[in-house]
């Protein structure tokens, strides 16, 4: 247990607030992706608030740690964490997916402060992380590159091209976070296209693999610490999560992969997130 | 006698010169370093060369990461696999994210020769031209290539550079001007505009000389930057001559011919003929044989011009 009771309370509350943002944002837009946002909430909360070296007042600071949301559809959790961290006002979350807003359906680095690269076509994030990490090594900088990949996303071939590149160049400044929620758009991942020995795959590619409960704040924190300590090879955090976590009717179903709650459903969700 | 040189030689020489001056330049390749001659850069600057393996999508994404970190990456691979397979990576990680990546498509056009249809990139310009923010540069020969590479380095934003493998005649001069986006007016004439790109400038010159003997005065415009195309130069030439023939070592669909057709249709409707490869795949053969096979020759340009003269007169 790395977290003090005080921190545990703080991040439990913050995660709950972020979940409230997620359902409110998708309700506001009438579309969006709550399921995979709710599964990634603790992971991104702990990453941004405990581990990433970033400056919300200077989002493009050259020495910042980078984060790439490779599973780019999960903007509700991403924007919520960025807003809570101070990259833009929390009130702006209610402009999610608005035509004149900065918070597009999928992340756009040109418009949204704190978004390091545009994404939304699955499979591209780890390659970009490798490029930043190689550049950091070349310049003798200590910056780190984090990338969040979905388990369904790992069906994309480019993920494995990039997974070869990271250990090949000894990029211990790369940390891949696998949001292993077991469900993709159409169905359970194992029914659509099974991942086989998912952890074994990463290990065999030369990664240091840490398997955790992605909703246990202390385990998440420990995993990021372990990644920083691991030298000579990159770390893949395989985080077992629950799609739709925190809202009973959204949990463990592909129905809420890309569906927004209506008025009644929003009310039900907010009651559960008090 | 005509001097021959491979465009890739001009490319690698310019890359090394730039590497000496600019520490932020990095080179990536997809297991084609020997063929693309980026291995010469690797010898000079081993720390700034990265072989990403046979994975064009990862290559382009990694280059985007380098650009994000402030480097100027030149991402090299065979043109057809690069532009075809990694199109989506160029669309999202490079162009949409507005990353300063130089995408270099090698083995261009007919230069893979006997490798056959799978290896002949005849659609790459079309693909790259369709990407928002992508600039598309197609130099004529090794001399112009050197200038293009240097201009590409100093150009801010995504850029596609097309590089051929086999020796082709050197037809441009060291002191010819080169500016991205600016066509070069090589010959003045009032009867027809021949607008060419890439290595077809050589056959275009030959055609223009032969036409001159036949009393037809050709205006020759070399469009090394297909996007953004030099609208003023195209319109001015077409206005002066009233007839246009485009020439490219690429499909007539989506490349220079299409770009010029779009400009003319909107600004100066003008009868047009397109010389290039037709809507078909290639075959195996020596580069010379392929240029004959595809009719990428002066004779075909002349035929198009004469056909256009007759049609236009009949109108």
Image (tube, coloured by chain):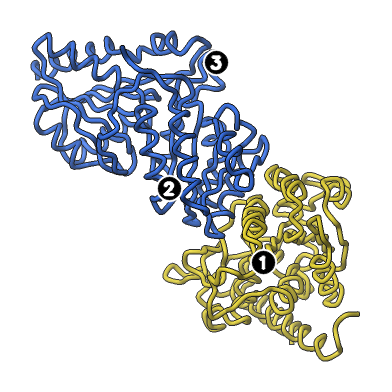
Disc 2: CA contacts within 10 A as few (<14), some (14-19) or many (>=20): many
A12 w.r.t. B66: above or below: below
Q: Which residue occupies the extreme bottom position in the image?
A: A6
Report the number of numbered marks: 3
Image mark for residue A143: 1
Image mark for residue B116: 3
**Residue at horizontal 75 percent and vertical 76 percent from the top:** A46
The answer to whether marks 3 and 1 mark residues whose Cβ atoms lie closer than 8 Å is: no
**Residue at horizontal 52 percent and vertical 20 percent from the top:** B112
What is the secondary structure assignment of the residue under circle 1? loop
Q: Which residue is mark 2?
A: B153
Disc 1: CA contacts within 10 A as few (<14), some (14-19) or many (>=20): many
- The answer to whether A202 appears left or right of B187 in the picture is right
Q: State the image quarter where residue A38 is shown.
A: bottom right
- Percent from the top left, x then y, of residue A121? 59, 51
Which chain appears yellow?
Answer: A
Chain B shade? blue
Disc 3: CA contacts within 10 A as few (<14), some (14-19) or many (>=20): some
Q: Chain of mark 2?
A: B
């Amino acid at each position: 247990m790395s977290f003090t009771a005080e921190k545990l309370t703080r991040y439990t509350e913050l995660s709950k607030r972020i979940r409230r943002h997620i359902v409110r944002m998708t309700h506001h837009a009438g579309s969006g992706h709550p399921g995979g946002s709710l599964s990634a909430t603790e992971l991104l909360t702990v990453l941004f608030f405990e581990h990433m070296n970033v400056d919300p007042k200077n989002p493009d600071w050259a020495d910042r740690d980078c984060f790439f949301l490779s599973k780019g559809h999960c903007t509700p959790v991403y924007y919520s964490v960025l807003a809570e961290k101070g990259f833009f006002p929390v009130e702006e979350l209610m402009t999610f997916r608005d035509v004149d807003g900065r918070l597009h359906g999928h992340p756009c680095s040109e418009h949204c402060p704190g978004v390091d690269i545009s994404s939304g076509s699955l499979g591209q994030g780890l390659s970009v992380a490798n490029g930043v990490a190689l550049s950091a090594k070349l310049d003798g900088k200590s910056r780190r590159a984090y990338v969040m990949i979905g388990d369904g996303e790992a069906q994309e071939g480019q993920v494995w091209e990039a997974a070869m590149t990271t250990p090949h160049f000894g990029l211990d400044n790369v940390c891949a976070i696998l949001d292993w929620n077991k469900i993709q758009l159409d169905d359970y991942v194992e029914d659509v296209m099974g991942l086989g020995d998912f952890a074994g795959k990463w290990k065999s590619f030369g990664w240091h693999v840490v398997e955790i409960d992605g909703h246990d704040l202390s385990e998440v924190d420990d995993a990021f610490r372990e990644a920083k300590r691991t030298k000579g090879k990159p770390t893949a955090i395989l985080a077992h999560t629950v799609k739709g976590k925190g809202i009973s009717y959204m949990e463990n179903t592909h129905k809420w992969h890309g569906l927004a709650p209506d008025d009644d459903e929003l009310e039900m969700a907010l009651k559960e997130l008090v | 006698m005509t001097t021959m040189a491979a465009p890739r030689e001009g490319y690698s020489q310019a890359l090394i010169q730039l590497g000496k001056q600019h520490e932020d330049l990095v080179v990536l390749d997809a297991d084609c370093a020997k063929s693309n001659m980026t291995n010469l850069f690797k010898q000079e600057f081993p720390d700034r060369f990265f072989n990403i393996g046979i994975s064009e999508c990862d290559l382009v994404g990694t280059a985007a990461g380098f650009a994000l970190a402030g480097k100027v990456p030149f991402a090299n691979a065979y043109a057809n696999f690069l532009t075809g397979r990694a199109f989506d990576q160029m669309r999202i990680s490079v162009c949409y994210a507005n990353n300063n990546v130089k995408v270099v498509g090698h083995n261009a056009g007919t230069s893979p020769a006997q490798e056959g249809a799978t290896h002949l990139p005849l659609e790459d310009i079309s693909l790259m031209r369709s990407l928002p923010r992508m600039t598309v540069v197609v130099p004529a020969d090794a001399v112009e290539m050197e200038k293009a590479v240097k201009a590409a380095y100093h150009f801010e934003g995504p850029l596609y550079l097309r590089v051929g493998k086999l020796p082709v005649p050197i037809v441009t001069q060291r002191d010819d001007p080169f500016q991205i986006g600016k066509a070069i007016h090589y010959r003045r004439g009032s009867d027809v505009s021949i607008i060419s790109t890439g290595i077809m400038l050589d056959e275009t010159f030959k055609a223009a000389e032969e036409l001159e003997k036949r009393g037809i005065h050709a205006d020759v415009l070399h469009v090394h930057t297909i996007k953004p195309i030099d609208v003023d130069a195209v319109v001015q030439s077409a206005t002066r001559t009233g007839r246009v023939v485009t020439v490219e070592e690429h499909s007539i669909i989506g490349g220079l011919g299409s770009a010029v057709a779009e400009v003319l249709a909107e600004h100066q409707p003008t009868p047009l003929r397109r010389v290039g490869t037709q809507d078909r795949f290639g075959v195996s053969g020596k580069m010379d044989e392929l240029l004959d096979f595809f009719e990428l020759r002066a004779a075909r340009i002349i035929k198009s011009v004469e056909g256009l003269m007759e049609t236009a007169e009949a109108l």
